[in-house]
Amino acid sequence: MKKVSKLLLGTFLTCFSLTACKAELVADFLGGNKQESPKPVSSATPLSSIVETAKPNVSPSPVIDTEITSMKFVELKTGYEDKTQLAAIYPIDFKNVWAVGTKGTIIHTTDGGINWTMINKGDKDLKSVFFLNSNLGWIAGANGVIFKTIDGGQTWTLQDSTAQGAVINDIKFYDESNGVFVSDKGVYHSQDGGNTWIKKGDIFANSITYRPDGIPIIYTIGSGLSSDNSSLYKYSKGVWEKNINLGSSYNSIYYKYNISLSFPTSLIGWLYWGNSIQKTVDGGDNWTKIEKFNTGSEFLTLSQVNPRFAQLITEKVGIIIAYPYNYALITKDGGITWGKISVEGFMSQGTTIGIVSIGALDYFYGNFYFKDLSHGWLLGNNQTIYRLGTP
């Protein structure tokens, strides 16, 4: 097969280089979005009728041109597996990676996971870690605890979340001032780097994603397991508006809790939840189901792929890891055509990627980050950290 040059990929979605994908700052984050919302594709069209499928009368096109034929993950050991259970991981860049877990544990590597150091901040379980750059970061968790560093993690300062007793599931900042955290007691905003927080809604939310234009979108599972509907909310004009009702996913707890939102641009994004993949081209107002995958030699259905996570890395380049973790689908044209490549290195078919369990009801979200198709980090169950690529 004729070799072609490797894919040149752009912005890394939620970490690595978040500041590079920022647009103009949101002028009044708490007061409301001053920008005009993108025009919906068709507000009258039901989601169930917007289904992206391959045309049955069209022959599969050639596999996308790429030199990547396989992905080889390396399982890493931190040395602290018997001291904590990790809940979240965040790579600032490929070598500089942070992770947090139970009993106030923070671990850090500066050499791509070869060596790790550990510090403890109290005894509360930590569930989220986020860095805006190599110096400025936040961690958060149970009992409303938030710690901030301005010196790359050398020191951490406790901030007042005003949410005592809450379990903070996720915390993100768009810039040095504007941030959001979501918890089991509501959604809180800050305009001063986390020094003060204001409650902006009673939504029981689980994860946050910022669009590059500064608009946050949150995901919620409701308030229990039985038959609650999962939903997306978008912050618009000073309030959180329900953007889409995803329906019940009670048939499987795994599908209920695994979630990923990818917005490499302010308009184009992917939503992965459970075993469903959807795409938006209008900033999240409307979503199109992706249900057929043209690999060049076959058309695969969503049930055949049985995805375990998906990320749109750039406007055109995306990846889906299929169960039982032995192959991946990659696209460089936004999902029109797909290449099928092998995946190696996962501990076993039973390894759960993107979810860590601490007791019956504690789950964590979005613990996979790809800078490109050759470099990424994954957090699985049983303290398992996987790295794709060589530091």
Image (tube, helix red, strand yellow):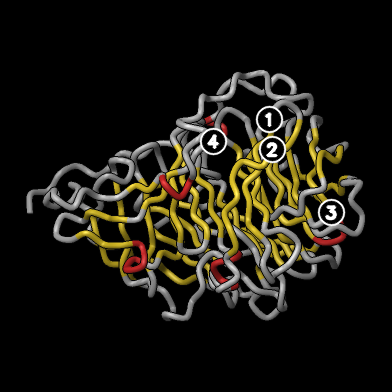
Distance between mark 3 and mark 1 Cα atoms: 21 Å
Label 1 element class: strand
Q: Would you place residue 169 above or below residue 20 in this image?
A: below
> Which residue lies under the disc numbered 3?
185
Disc 3 marks a residue whose amino acid type is Lys
> Which residue lies under the disc numbered 1?
236
Q: Residues within 10 Å of mark 2 (few under 14, many from 20)?
A: few
> Which residue lies under the disc numbered 2?
241
> Which residue lies under the disc numbered 4?
285
Identify the residue at horizontal 86%, vertical 37% (top origin): 198
Label 3 element class: loop
Identify the residue at horizontal 14%, vertical 52% (top origin): 60
Q: Would you place residue 58 above or below residue 274 in this image?
A: above
Among numbered discs 4 and 3, the one appearing first in the sequence: 3
Label 2 element class: strand
The answer to whether residue 114 is seen in the rendering is yes
Distance between mark 1 and mark 4 Cα atoms: 11 Å
Disc 2 marks a residue whose amino acid type is Glu
Among numbered discs 1 and 4, the one appearing first in the sequence: 1
The N terminus, quarter of image? bottom left
Distance between mark 2 and mark 4 Cα atoms: 11 Å
The C terminus, quarter of image? bottom left
Residue contact between numbered discs 4 and 3, judged by CB atoms under 8 Å: no
Q: Residue 130 versus residue 354: which sits nearer the camera?
A: 354
Identify the residue at horizontal 57%, vertical 32% (top origin): 19
Q: Position of residue 280 (x, y in %)?
A: 46, 39
Q: Residue 304 versus residue 134: which sits nearer the camera?
A: 304
Among numbered discs 2 and 4, the one appearing first in the sequence: 2
